Amino acid sequence: MERVRIGVIGGSGVYEMEALRDIEEITLETPFGSPSGPYVVGTLEGQRVAFLARHGRGHFISPTQLPSRANIWGFKKLGVEYLIAISACGSLKEEYAPGHIVIPDQLFDRTRLRPVSFFDDPLRGTGGIVVHVSVADPICPFLSDILYQAVQATGTPVHKGGTFVIIEGPRFSTKGESRVFRQWGLDIIGMTAIPEAFLAREAEMSYAIMAHVTDYDVWHETEEPVTVEAIIQTLLRNAEIAKQAVQNAVRALKDAPPSPYANALKDAIITRPELIPPEVKERLSLLVGKYL
C-alpha cells in the first residue's frame, strides 16, 4: 500500500474532493471496527491525499456514533502524518459571523458518551496498557499556521486562535448552556473535534481544524437560533472555499518535515512492557510497536 502523508476529514457539507486525480477507494478494517466509509485516495498538487467523509456519504452517522477510533486508525495505517479536519461550528462571539472561518488552537471537552482513547479498552481487546498522552496543546500550531494562510489566500474572513467547545449532541444547545459557554470565554461550538484530536495525538499525527461558522448558536438576541436549514445553507456556500483552502494547504505541505508529534507516545506509556499482554502488543503494534 502506498504511503499517504496528508489526510482530510470532510465534515458537514463536504463529502468529496472533486480536485483529486488518479483516485482509488480503499476500504479498511481496524481493531475498532469499520471507518465511516472508504478512504478516497488521490493526487492533489502532486501529492497523494486521503479523504474521508466523517459522517459517511449522505451524512448518516450522528456525532455520538462516529467511529472516530476506526477513522483515525485508518488514516494512520495509510501513513498520514498531517490531518486536516473540516468542521461546522456555531459562533459564541459577535465578531465571528456566519460565513467566517476559525482556525482554533484549543479544545474544551463537554462530551460524555464517546471512547476517547485507543488504549485500555477490554471490550476492543486493548486492555492492559495505560497511556497518558499530553494534549495540553491538542491542535498542531504548525499545521494551523498553514491552514490559516491557506484560508487567507481564498479571501474569506478567517480568525486565528480560539477555544472550540465540543458538546455531545446531536441536539443543539439550550440558551442557558450557550450563555454559560460565552461567560467561560469559549469562542466556537461544535460536536466532532473530540475525540478526533486526542486520537490523532495518540496516533502521533498533526491535527488542525478549519471550522466554518454557520450560526450564532442560540445566545444571540437579534439572530434566529441555530437550525439545520441555516447550517446547510452556509455550508453549501462555503464548501468550495473549504476545498480551495485544502488545496492551498496541501501545496504548502509539499516539503513539510515529519509531524512534530511523530514521537508523542515516547514517554506516555506507563505500563511496564513485560506486563502488557502479547496479544495487546500485537493488536496495537501500529501505534506502539516501535516502543515495545
Image (cartoon, rainbow, N blue to C red):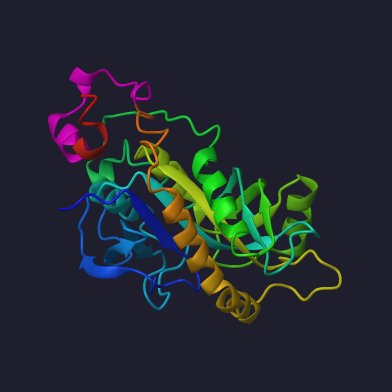
Image check: 72 left or right of 99? left
Residue at image position (77%, 76%) is 224
Q: Residue 8 falls in which quadrant of the image?
A: bottom left
Residue 248 rendering spot, x and y as whole percentages = 48, 58
Q: Answer above or below: position of 223 versus 33.
A: below
Q: Residue pushed farthest right?
A: 222
**Residue 180 part of the magenta-drawn span:** no
**Residue 190 visible within the image:** no
Q: Quadrant where the C terminus lies? A: top left
Q: Residue 56 falls in which quadrant of the image?
A: bottom left
Image check: 182 left or right of 60? right
Residue 60 rendering spot, x and y as whole percentages = 40, 74
Residue 78 rendering spot, x and y as whole percentages = 24, 51
**Residue 262 visible within the image:** yes
Residue 158 rendering spot, x and y as whole percentages = 67, 57
**Residue 269 part of the magenta-drawn span:** yes
Q: Answer above or below: position of 140 versus 110.
A: above
Bounds of the magenta segment: 266-284
Residue at image position (21%, 64%) is 26
Residue at image position (65%, 65%) is 156
